[in-house]
Image: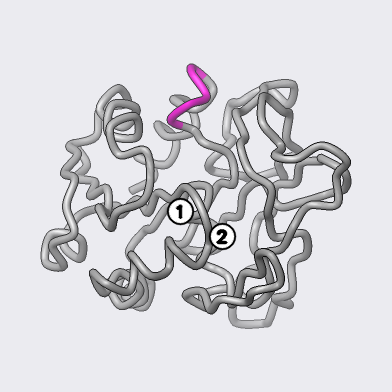
Amino acid sequence: MKSVVLLDYGSGNLHSAKRALDRVGADVTVTADPKAALACDGLVVPGVGAFAACMEGLLAVKGDRIIGQRLAGGRPVLGICVGMQIMFERGVEFGIEAAGCGEWPGTVDRLAAPVLPHMGWNTVRAPEKSVLFDGIDAETRFYFVHSYAAQRWELEPSEVLAAPLLTWADHGGDFLAAVENGPLSATQFHPEKSGDAGAALLKNWVDSL
């Protein structure tokens, strides 16, 4: 059984996320303890609410350092919703810019859609060879609730690093619905609220640990 730590930094649907991870056979611990977060097979970083508030909570438990140390050692991390957004360099909400973890370059900003938040079920366009979406039908819908997202990918592939696998969705324009980039994966949607589809994705991630 793979050990998973659900990082408790004051943001995220911890109960729902734990239940969803339990369902797919992970041995889940909810904690902010650095030793546990560094030692586990996989770390999940949830997140709901404002980008700046999530970063404030993450910094308070030194979560940015935990994430950085895990990734430096090739140890898997999965970000969910705002937990995905804070992996980018910065977020802009109501004209206020806040620094993120900086694991990926780029800015999270407001969707250019007539109706916000983007709330409900939506299909995504996953790439070939995706681990997260392996065996999941292209017409499968996942549950989103957000007004902000990364709408561009600014990291160029190099000869050293493999090109990331980018999954896109549309709401008033394209935005990143998921990224798989070495040990760091993330989803803008909530797999823990996406029923069987979310369970299939989480199982794929847990099985890959």
Residue, x 85% and y 44% (percent of image)?
113
Residue, x 26% and y 74% (percent of image)?
62
As shown in the figure, which amino acid type bears the numbered disc 1? Gly
Instruction: Give the residue number, with chain letter if any, for mark 1.
Output: 79
Pick the front one: 15 or 105:
15
Q: Residue furthest bottom?
A: 159
Q: In this view, does 175 lie to the left or right of 173?
A: left
Distance Cα–Cα, label 2 vs label 1: 8 Å
| Residue 176 position within the rendered picture, expressed as x and y whole percent measured from the top left | 71, 52
| Residue 141 position within the rendered picture, expressed as x and y whole percent measured from the top left | 67, 23
Question: From which residue to which does the magenta span run?
Answer: 192-196
Q: In this view, does 17 lie to the left or right of 37?
A: right
Q: Which of marks 2 and 1 is in front?
A: 2
- Element at label 2: helix
Disc 2 and disc 1 in contact, CB within 8 angstroms: yes
Find residue 115 and report its image quarter. Answer: top right
Residue, x 17% and y 37% (percent of image)?
27
Residue 142 seen in the figure: yes
Residue, x 72% and y 28% (percent of image)?
122
As shown in the figure, which amino acid type bears the numbered disc 2? Gln
Answer above or below: position of 104 versus 150. Answer: below
Crowding at label 2, few (<14), some or many (≥20) Cα neighbours within 10 Å?
many
Q: In this view, does 123 lie to the left or right of 3?
A: right
Answer above or below: position of 16 versus 114. Answer: above
Magenta span: chief secondary structure: helix
Q: Which mark is residue 130?
A: none
Instruction: Give the residue number, with chain letter if any, for mark 2.
Output: 85
| Residue 37 position within the rendered picture, expressed as x and y whole percent measured from the top left | 20, 60
Q: Which label's residue is closer to the chain start, 2 or 1? A: 1
